[in-house]
């Protein structure tokens, strides 16, 4: 009997292992965050699958703070990474829970990917998601006057493009001041010439490649920027954040740069999940930035 029980347990463990490793990296992070010791930070069910466009990718999820707000709350819209071709919003519940539990209405927005679409489609989607939030977030206790953008990697690129180049928001009848701040996690902002297959496929067909680069649109009246990166990032090198920080500063704009020691490209988003927060104070730095603006 014991032999059969042990065999059954072994089978369960093997199946669980296959199930876990079949998940995407963000989904694994989300699972680890849920299973972390201690009381959960956030237990409310999010509102999921809200369409801001007609494409299946043009959807968003909303994590609102648990208690009914006495006044509208700051809004944080997050765009995930994935080299403009991969990723999905469903894996980022850990981020939604982290910031909703700290008093922000947190929106996880998806967008169309290459090679199905090319630049500027995903930037247009970013603007469309912002427009939806601006028009509707009050129904979820959010303050449309305090919208902040946040993105990791390619998500930081499209968030920064939308914040710095006014044409994308103008196409949605919005002005740049609808955005009160932008948080970039390990974002590519100045990466010409294109050297990776993913960037060539997503951006390479555009006639003037400088128009795909956030650094081109740096300006003194840009929304305040919080540029976070790690000194061990070999995927999107820290120089991207450094050079954008330097240019905004030279122009007289508002920016803050944080370079975390011993932090790589994946580490910086991992640090939002509960089991890995010792890697870098991402959550604390983002909360302080939003509260200061």
Image (cartoon, rainbow, N blue to C red):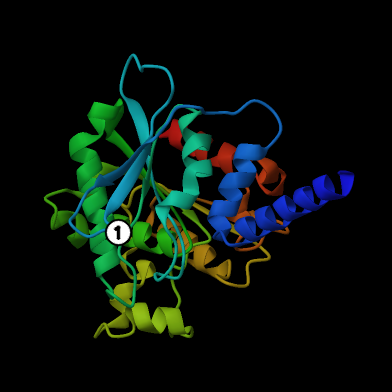
**Residue 147 appears left or right of 243:** left
Q: Residue at x 20, y 46 (%)?
A: 131
The x, y position of residue 190, in whole percent, is: 44, 73
**Residue 233 appears left or right of 223:** right
Q: Which residue is mark 1?
A: 57
**Residue 252 appears left or right of 98:** left
Q: Quadrant of residue 65?
A: top left
Q: Residue at x 21, y 44 (%)?
A: 132
Q: Residue at x 53, y 42 (%)?
A: 94
Question: Of residues 154 and 214, which is closer to you in this image?
Answer: 154
Is residue 127 visible to the viewer in this orientation of the structure? Answer: yes
Q: Quadrant of residue 86?
A: bottom left
Q: Residue at x 60, y 54 (%)?
A: 268
Q: Secondary structure at mark 1?
A: loop
Other-residue count near label 1 (Cα within 10 Å), few / some / many at <14 / 14–19 / ≥20? some
Question: Of residues 235 and 64, which is closer to you in this image?
Answer: 64
Q: Quadrant of residue 198?
A: bottom left
């Amino acid at each position: 009997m014991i032999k059969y029980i042990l065999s059954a347990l072994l089978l369960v463990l093997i199946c669980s292992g296959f199930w876990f490793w079949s998940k995407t990296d963000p989904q694994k992070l989300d699972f680890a965050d849920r299973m972390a010791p201690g009381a959960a930070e956030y237990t409310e069910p999010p509102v999921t699958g809200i369409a801001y466009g007609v494409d299946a990718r043009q959807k968003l999820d909303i994590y609102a703070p648990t208690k009914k707000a006495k006044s509208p709350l700051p809004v944080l819209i997050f765009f995930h990474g994935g080299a403009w071709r991969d990723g999905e919003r469903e894996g980022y519940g850990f981020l939604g829970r982290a910031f909703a539990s700290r008093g922000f209405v947190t929106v996880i927005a998806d967008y169309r990917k290459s090679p199905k679409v090319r630049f500027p489609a995903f930037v247009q989607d970013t603007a469309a998601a912002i427009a939806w939030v601006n028009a509707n977030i009050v129904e979820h206790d959010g303050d449309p006057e305090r919208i902040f953008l946040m993105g990791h990697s390619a998500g930081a690129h499209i968030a920064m493009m939308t914040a710095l180049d006014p044409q994308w928001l103008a196409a949605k009848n919005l002005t740049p001041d609808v955005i009160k701040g932008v948080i970039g996690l390990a974002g590519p902002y100045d990466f010409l010439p294109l050297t990776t297959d993913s960037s060539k496929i997503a951006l390479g067909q555009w006639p003037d490649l400088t128009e795909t680069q956030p650094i081109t649109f740096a300006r003194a009246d840009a929304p305040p920027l919080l540029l976070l990166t790690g000194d061990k990032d070999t995927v999107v090198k820290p120089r991207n954040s450094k050079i954008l920080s330097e240019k905004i500063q030279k122009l007289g704009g508002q920016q803050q740069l944080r370079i975390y020691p011993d932090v790589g490209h994946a580490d910086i988003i991992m640090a939002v999940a509960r089991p890995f927060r010792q890697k870098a104070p991402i959550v604390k730095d983002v909360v302080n930035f939003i509260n200061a603006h």
